Structures are given as structure tokens and as C-alpha cells.
Image (spheres, rainbow, N blue to C red):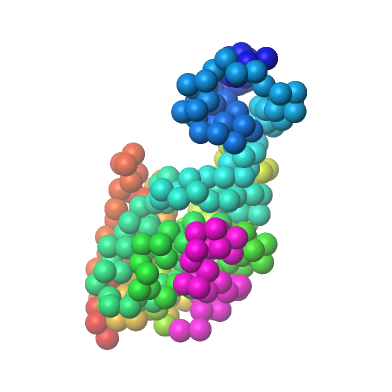
Amino acid sequence: MTRRQALERAGELLTRHKIEDAALEAEVFLAHVLKITRTQLLTEPDVELKKRQEDTFKTFVKRRIKGEPNAYITGHREFYGLDFLVDKRVLIPRPETEMLVEQAILRAKTFQNPIIADVGTGSGAIAVSLAKSLPQAEIYAVDISKAALKAAGRNSLQHGVQEKVKFVQGDLLEPVPVSVDIIVANLPYVITDDVPKVNTAGFEPGQALDGGPDGLDVIKRLCQQAKDKLNGNGCLLLETGMGQSQAVAKLLRELFPLSKIEIINDLSGIERVVCATLPAK
């Protein structure tokens, strides 16, 4: 079977099972199996596949049809222009979360040597991206899951920032030993009743998705803890789900009445990031 034939058959199969972007997913899988770029794959379509390559590719397609996310199948996901290793220990980084990184970098530039806490680090995508962009920053990456921290540590090694990011295990800000200038967090915000409806449910860790009855349980606890951890002029950046931003902004106004509250839309127009910037102490 040639590369072209394999892609055509896989594309048809994935389409039949209502997998979006079926042709693209087939290309990603086959390029990964062959350890080449998609460009190489498409410019040399008539090369014959070896039996082992064909079998592995078919296995990938079968796993995808059963609903397993492609990032877990290949073990990789691009985020903020970097390649991250991902597996079932961690949430798969989403494109919309890149906005948190952009906003954190923007605000970090107002500090000479910013201290940043990435809470609920998961794969370490946010912490590692910040470390690559802000060499002068001191970064703490926190997660309650020991397994997730191991995954994040692998990514810090892969990108050469293992000396810049301190990984600490515990509940939200509790294990962070110092007060910080920036808190950035992509915490669980899916309403408990909606978790089974998430298309990656059953594959991604439930702890990383379930935000309680209103989706805001973990976010509320972090906001309470932030009162004792955030320096003057510091800011708290939170990713929120659709329809949650106003409730989070209201909570922040109550906890930090003198702070400046901003709500920032993502590229789809969803109010995605809520930011509270404190006055100087």
C-alpha cells in the first residue's frame, strides 16, 4: 500500500465516523508513524509503506475512531509554537489557553524580575512557554497530581528550561513558598453535569475537567488563596469557560475591591480570560 492509498482509505474511514478534519488527522498520524513532516509525506505520496508502518497507522486510526484524542495517540501537541509531550496524565493543551501566556508575558514586562505561579500546570505548557519567553522570570509550576508534575518535568527538560521552572506539588497556591507578581491558571471549569458531554471525557483526567456544580469551585478557592500570595501591582489571570467570566469578575471585585478587572475575549469572541490587577501596596 502506498502513502496515498493509506491516506485515502483512512480519510474515508474517519469521515464515515464523523471525525472532523479527517484528511488532516490521517496525514498527522501517517507523518508521525513515518517520522517525517507532513510536507514530505505529501510530496512523496507513492512510496510504499512497510508492513509494520501500515499496521501502526491502522491502529492509530482505530483508536481515533473510538474517540481517543489524536494528541494522546501521537503523544504530542503543539502549544505556543512549541512541541509538548502529552499523555493521559494531563489535560491536552488548547489553543485558547495561549491567550493566558500572551497576557502573562505582557504583564510580566512591567516587572524587572517577575515571580510567576502557574497553578494547575498539567503538561507544563504554560510554565514552559513562559520560561522560554521570559528568561528573567522565576516560575513556580504547581499541580496536585504527582503524575502530572512528572509529565511537566519531561517537557521542561525537552525545552531546556528545567533550571528556570520549580515544580511543586500541592493544593493550588499552598505549596508556593513566596509571594508572587503574577498568578496564571487554567483550572478545571467544566460543570460537573457537563463533563460526560466533553468529547475527550473518559480519556482526559476527570480531575482536570470537573469544576463542580457551577464549574467555578476550584477557581473560587484559588481566588481566596491569592489574597495572601499576590504582591502589590501583581495580577491574577484566569481562564474561564463560556458564560463564566462575569461571575468570576464579580468575585474578584469582592475580594480585591481596589483592583482593576479586565475581561479579554478569545479569537472566537468568547470571554476567555479574566484579569485582576492589584494596586501598589
Decide which of 239, 137 is in the foreground and name it: 137
Q: Is residue 122 above or below residue 43?
A: below
**Residue segment shown in magenta:** 153-178
Number of disc labels: 0
Query: From where the camera sits, is residue 97 visible?
Result: yes
Q: Nearer the viewer, residue 216 or 206?
A: 206
Asked where in the image residue 261 lies, by quadrant, the reply is bottom left
Within the magenta stretch, is there residue 161? yes
Q: Is residue 124 in view from this perspective?
A: no
- Name the image quarter holding the C terminus: bottom left
Image x and y of residue 121, in percent: 53, 62
Please provide percent x and percent y for residue 26: 57, 25
* Residue in view at x 58 percent, y 41 percent: 71
List x then y, in percent, for residue 112: 28, 78
Vertical order, 55 against 4 (above or below): below
Residue drawn at 38 percent across, 73 percent down:
137
Instruction: Point out residue 68 in the picture as x, y percentages from the top left corner.
Output: 65, 36
Going by the image, does 2 lie left or right of 98? right
- Left or right relative to 263: residue 160: right
Q: Quadrant of the N terminus?
A: top right
Q: Quadrant of residue 182?
A: bottom left
The answer to if 148 sits in the magenta stretch is no
- Residue at (61% x, 54% y) in the render: 90
Residue that appears at 24% across and 82% down: 280
Using the rendered view, name the quadrant where residue 36 is placed: top right
